[in-house]
Amino acid sequence: MPAGLKRVFGLGDLHFLTFSCYRRLPLLKSARARDIFVRELAGVRAEMRFRLIGYVMMPEHVHLLISEPPGKTPSTVLHRLKLRVAKRLRRKRRRPAAEQMELLFLKSVQAPRSFWQARFYDFNVYSEGKKKEKLNYMHANPVKRGLVDHPKDWAWSSWRFYFSEEKSLMRMDR
C-alpha cells in the first residue's frame, strides 16, 4: 500500500470508492461495457450482501458508495467485482476481421493486458452530510466531463433512482 494511504474498516461507515481502468483508458466507453458492469455489480452485491447507496460509471473510472459487506471489507468487494467485469468484457470482445488484424499489426496497437488499475481510493463516509456530498459529486461527474447536459441523461448512475420518474438500472439501498 502506498505511503500515507490508510484504510479503515469495521466502524460501520459507508465507503466512497473510486477505481480506474488500466492507465485510465476508456475501457468502459461503450454502453455495452457499462451494462455488463451494472449486471456484475448487481450479482456481487447480492452475493456479498453490501448496501449500495450510489454509483456512477464513467468511460475510464467508477465511483461507488457502499457499506461494508458482513464479515468482509470493501477491498474484497472490489476484488471480486473487478475480476468478474474484466473476465466478462475480455470474453465478449469480437475477433477482428483479417484486414483489421493486419492493420492492428502494422500500427502495433494492442489491447492492454490489464483491465483495471491495481489500486483504489477509499474514503470513509461518516455523516449524512458527507453522504450527500459524495452522491452529488458522483451524479455531477458526467455533466462536468461533458458527456451529458444533465445527470438525468446519464443512465449509468444512481441519479435516476433518487430524482427521476424514469426507471433506474439498479435499485439503491437508502
Image: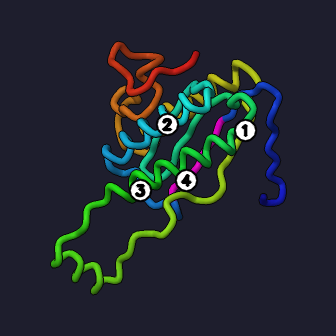
Q: Is residue 19 magenta?
A: yes
Instruction: From this view, report whether residue 94 is shown above or below residue 135.
Output: below
Front label number (4 vs 2): 2
Q: Which residues are magenta?
A: 16-21
N-term-proximal mark, 4 vs 1: 4
Separation of residues labelled 2 and 3 (CA atoms): 16 Å
Image quadrant containing the N terminus: bottom right
N-term-proximal mark, 4 vs 2: 4
Image quadrant containing the C terminus: top right
Amino acid type of the residue that numbered disc 3 sits on in the rendered structure: Leu
Separation of residues labelled 4 and 2 (CA atoms): 15 Å
N-term-proximal mark, 2 vs 3: 3
Task: Specify the label residue 27 is tagged with.
Answer: 3
Q: Are marks 2 and 3 in contact (CB under 8 Å)?
A: no
Q: Are marks 2 and 1 in contact (CB under 8 Å)?
A: no
Task: Specify the label residue 20 is tagged with.
Answer: 4
Check disc 2 and report the residue beneath it. 41
Q: Secondary structure at mark 2?
A: helix
**Residue drawn at point x = 44 percent, y = 16 percent:** 163
Q: Secondary structure at mark 4?
A: strand
Front label number (1 vs 3): 1
N-term-proximal mark, 4 vs 3: 4
Q: Are marks 4 and 1 in contact (CB under 8 Å)?
A: no
**Residue drawn at point x = 35 percent, y = 83 percent:** 108
**Residue drawn at point x = 82 percent, y = 28 percent:** 11
Check disc 1 and report the residue beneath it. 73
Separation of residues labelled 2 and 1 (CA atoms): 16 Å
Amino acid type of the residue that numbered disc 2 sits on in the rendered structure: Leu
Q: Secondary structure at mark 1?
A: loop
Q: Nearer the viewer, residue 129 or 9?
A: 9
**Dot 3 surroundings within 10 Å: few (below 14), some, or many (20 or more)?**
many
**Dot 2 surroundings within 10 Å: few (below 14), some, or many (20 or more)?**
many
